[in-house]
Amino acid sequence: MNNYSRHFIFFALLMPGHLLLGSKYWCPKGHFNLNQHNFFQKLARDVKPKYALETGFCTGRSASSLLEAAQLKTFISIDINLDYIKPEGRIFAQLLQKDFPEFKLIEGDSKVVLTNDFFAENFPHGIDWVTVDGDHSYAGCLHDLEVSSAYVSEHGIIIIDDYRSSGPDGVSIPHVTSAVDYFCKHHKEFKITVWNHRGKGFAILTRCETQDTIINRVTSSSD
């Protein structure tokens, strides 16, 4: 039996300015880093989402960060290919679904999965937290934004990974940045806040003044 096949995985990361992190839900492989994890958890504890949607599971780092910090009732993650990082993608998908009954993973294309019927069945009360981190093409990112934003609750937020990303820790993905900028230009009801640490970037969108204040506070304290 290898380490991944055990249902108790413990490892540690040490980064300047951070405590040692050990969690069986944090996969050793993945693009979502510890600074992003810390930001997600701080924000989740303050905005207190109940219903969450994610496009782009990868190895579950962002999903586990949210699951451990928030008291969620429903959380659905959609990923087109759980073998993108093998075998960790499927192992951590199984682990999170086993240990968090509120979590469900759908392997499929968000352009096919995210229908009106899907939202009506799974999110009749709207969505409080959306993570967009799946298809990184312009059309794919914009699709996930346009479709999910129509079902975001009054107090909901949308987080888009890789916005204005660069080195040393991130990679520039201009299609994502362009898609977010286009969306915000045509949906001025959403306020945008940008978080960036060593090149890893998020755009955080909300229509709610209260949540916007919280987002700005958490962003400022996490720089």
Image (cartoon, rainbow, N blue to C red):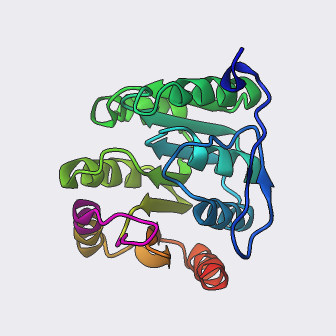
Q: Nearer the viewer, residue 112 or 68?
A: 68
Instruction: Tell whether 194 sits left or right of 213.
Output: left
Q: Is any atom of residue 71 visible in this view?
A: no
Task: Please name the predominant secondary structure of the magenta segment in the image.
Answer: loop
Residue lying farthest left? 139
Decide: is 139 above or below 96. Answer: below
Taking the spot 53% from the left edge, 49% from the top edge, the residue there is 127
The percent coordinates of residue 173 (x first, y second) are: 28, 62
Taking the spot 44% from the left edge, 27% from the top edge, the residue there is 82
Q: Is any atom of residue 152 visible in this view?
A: yes
The percent coordinates of residue 165 (x first, y second) are: 37, 69
Magenta stretch: includes residue 167: yes
Q: From the image, which quarter does the N terminus lie in? A: top right
Taking the spot 80% from the left edge, 29% from the top edge, the residue there is 8
Q: Nearer the viewer, residue 213 or 57?
A: 57
Q: How many marks?
A: 0
Highlighted magenta segment, given as a residue range: 164-179
Decide: is 69 above or below 214. Answer: above
Magenta stretch: includes residue 42: no
The percent coordinates of residue 189 (x first, y second) are: 37, 73
Residue lying farthest top? 1
Taking the spot 19% from the left edge, 50% from the top edge, the residue there is 139
Residue lying farthest front? 2
Decide: is 37 above or below 66. Answer: below
Q: From the image, which quarter does the C terminus lie in? A: bottom right
Decide: is 159 above or below 2. Answer: below
The percent coordinates of residue 161 (x first, y second) are: 43, 60
Q: Nearer the viewer, residue 157 or 172?
A: 172
Instruction: Tell whether 186 sits left or right of 6.
Output: left
On the image, which quarter does residue 172 sit in? bottom left
Instruction: Tell whether 88 sits left or right of 147.
Output: right
